[in-house]
Structures are given as structure tokens and as C-alpha cells.
Image (spheres, rainbow, N blue to C red):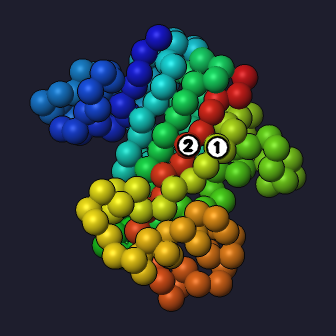
């Protein structure tokens, strides 16, 4: 089964097939993620990596439905996006979508949001969310580490009560396809 890096740009992950809308070094398949369907058969993908891409697309729910279609049951899907309170989320004029900690709960059949609203038939189990994944590599300070720890242990509390005072920069969602 294939591993797919959607929106890879020039930073395709090793061992992955890279797809991007631009013909760049490392891109294996040129395809616009706003054009459906994607050039893959139903259930042929075992793993998807999508880092700093979903905030740029026209219809993020439809993109996730297409990711669901092309993935096999149990496929791992990792998605990194700017956190909606982040400076980085709002300075890029190409960002169309903004993400909070609970965004993927609408896809998780075990969550009340999914049960109540039924926006989509695409189902993903939310394994965990990680704040500031990229920043952890760069030797962050103690205060930053403490805020991340709080946000990851109590994301609803962090987002509702203190994220406006101490905004973090990014979210990474670790999902599993449920079919």
C-alpha cells in the first residue's frame, strides 16, 4: 500500500509519494487538491501526511472526504495546520481555513459533535492532537513547554480559557480511518 504526502511542495517525506499542485522537485504527481476526485482508487492508501496544506484548500470537509475515500480502513492520517490563534495563521493571505483543537471531532463517530451534526459520512478516529510539533525540535523554553503540556492535556480548557493570552502556533492531528 502507498504512503501519500499531500501538498508536499519541495519537502516530500522520505518513502512517500508526493502530490502537489505545482510541478516542483520531489513532486511525483501534479494535482490540485481543490479538484475532485483525486487520482487514486478507493482504499489504496495506507498512510497520509498533510502538513500545512488544509488551511489553503477551498473545501476542507470535501478534502477530508476524498482522503477518506482513497484510504484503506485503519489508514493513518497525520495533518498539521496553524492553530487559529497563531500569528502564522492570520498573516498568510492564502490561508482560507482556521483550526481549533476540536475541529476533527466532527469526523469522530465516538464524539457528540459527530453524532449530533452528521456533516459528513467520512469517519476518522482522533487519536491525539499535538500542539507546536515543529517548535519542539528547536529547543523551546520552559514556559512554552508548560503551555504545550497544558494544552495537550486539557485542550478544551486551554482553548476556552487561556489560548488568547498564550497562543500556541500549530496543531497536528493524528487520525485513523474508520470504515
Query: Which quadrant of the figure has residue 143?
Result: bottom left
Q: Which residue is mark 2?
A: 174
Residue 23: image location, x then y, percent: 17, 30
Query: Can residue 171 be seen by looking at this rendering?
Result: yes
The numbered dot on residue 35 is none
Q: State which tag comes first along the sequence, 1 or 2.
A: 1
Q: Position of residue 99 (x, y in %)?
A: 53, 61
Q: Is residue 122 left or right of residue 167?
A: right
Residue under label 1, please give it.
Answer: 127
Q: Residue at x 47, y 45 (%)?
A: 79
Residue 4 x %, y %: 39, 25
Q: Nearer the viewer, residue 112 or 20?
A: 112
Q: Which residue is at the front of the view, 112 or 153?
A: 153
Q: What element does badge 2 sit on?
A: strand
Q: Is residue 158 left or right of residue 56?
A: right
Check the image and name the residue furthest to the front: 142
Q: Are marks 1 and 2 in contact (CB under 8 Å)?
A: yes
Amino acid at each position: 500500500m502507498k504512503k501519500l504526502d499531500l501538498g508536499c511542495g519541495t519537502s516530500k517525506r522520505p518513502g512517500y509519494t508526493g502530490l502537489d499542485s505545482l510541478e516542483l522537485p520531489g513532486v511525483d504527481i501534479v494535482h490540485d487538491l481543490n479538484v475532485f476526485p483525486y487520482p487514486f482508487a478507493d482504499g489504496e492508501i495506507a498512510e497520509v501526511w498533510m502538513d500545512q496544506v488544509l488551511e489553503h484548500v477551498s473545501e476542507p470537509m470535501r478534502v477530508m472526504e476524498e482522503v477518506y475515500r482513497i484510504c484503506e480502513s485503519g489508514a493513518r492520517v497525520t495533518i498539521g495546520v496553524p492553530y487559529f490563534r497563531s500569528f502564522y495563521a492570520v498573516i498568510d493571505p492564502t490561508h482560507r481555513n482556521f483550526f481549533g483543537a476540536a475541529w476533527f471531532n466532527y469526523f469522530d463517530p465516538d464524539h457528540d459533535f459527530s453524532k449530533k451534526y452528521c456533516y459528513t459520512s467520512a469517519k476518522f478516529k482522533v487519536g491525539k492532537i499535538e500542539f507546536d510539533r515543529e517548535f519542539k525540535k528547536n529547543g523551546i523554553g520552559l514556559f512554552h513547554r508548560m503551555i504545550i503540556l497544558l494544552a495537550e492535556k486539557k485542550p478544551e480548557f486551554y482553548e476556552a480559557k487561556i489560548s488568547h493570552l498564550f497562543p500556541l502556533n500549530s496543531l497536528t492531528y493524528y487520525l485513523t480511518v474508520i470504515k
